[in-house]
Amino acid sequence: MPIFAVSKQKDNEILTRMSGFTNSNLKKIEPMSKTTWKIDELHSDVQFKIKHLVISTVTGSFTKFSAEAETDGDDFAGGKISFSADVNSITTGNDQRDGHLKSPDFFDVANHPTMDFISTSVEKSSDGYKLHGNLTLRGVTKPVTLLVEFGGTATDIYGNFKAGFEVSGKISRSEFGLMWGAVTEAGGVVVSDEVKIAANVQMMKVVAEMA
């Protein structure tokens, strides 16, 4: 048998074995399923803290808010997160102060009823995640980075699978147009520019309904 015929025969045998391996032995890699999460409002709170007279801290919160997340499996790294708070639900425990915060001096609730956050990236850190995104407040959108401590996962007594987080960060209120300020007779600042954000959050996995 001519040499080139032997070579051609062996090539055909190799191609046959490769074809068989490709078709029957390789497993198809399925894309990871997407998981949808919604915030459990009853077991979450969203607060802010601001210095008053530089010597003490006033704490406020939003009582109405919503949040959703979409992740690959149960890992929030690389996920998409959105949050919205009803600014009119703000409370600091003092009606007069709350009314001032809702006025054009601060949040201007009549024209800007919500505070919104949309993530741009979520990356893992040593104790949880770094959450990067755009915060829109009083019609101004700025990039912010929030630190997220992961508290773990658990299933509640109703069978809902949940993930817990503690979120913290800082913003400059003047960058978002909250410019009101006053000074004391001694020249002290009444309200600080820096605002600390603190939230305790439970995200609940949404179970898809069977068709």
Image (cartoon, helix red, strand yellow):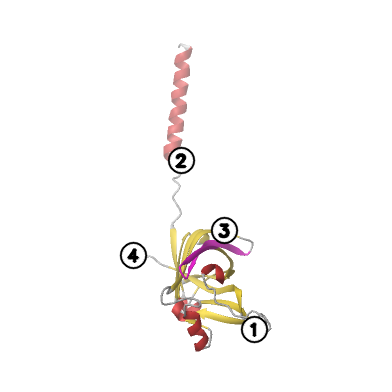
Q: What is the distance, in whole Å, between disc 2 and disc 3 at their CAs?
A: 35 Å
Instruction: Label 3: state its secondary structure.
Output: strand
Q: Position of residue 49 (x, y in %)?
A: 59, 77
The residue sitting at 52% across, 85% down in the picture is: 97
The answer to whether one can see residue 166 in this image is no
Instruction: Label 2: state its secondary structure.
Output: helix
Give the residues drawn in magenta, as a range: 127-143
Residue 123, labelled with which disc? Answer: 3
Residue 184, labelled with which disc? Answer: 1
Quadrant assignment for the N terminus:
top left
Mark toward the viewer: 3 or 4: 3
Q: Amino acid at mark 4?
A: Met
Q: What is the distance, in whole Å, between disc 3 and disc 1 at their CAs?
A: 43 Å
Q: What is the distance, in whole Å, between disc 4 and disc 2 at their CAs?
A: 33 Å
Instruction: Label 1: state its secondary structure.
Output: loop
The answer to whether one can see residue 173 in this image is yes
Q: What is the distance, in whole Å, between disc 1 and disc 4 at their CAs?
A: 63 Å
- Residues at badges 2 and 1 in contact (C-beta under 8 Å)? no
Residue 40, labelled with which disc? Answer: none
Determine the main secondary structure of the stretch shown in magenta: strand
Please tell me which residue lies in front, 103 or 29.
Answer: 103
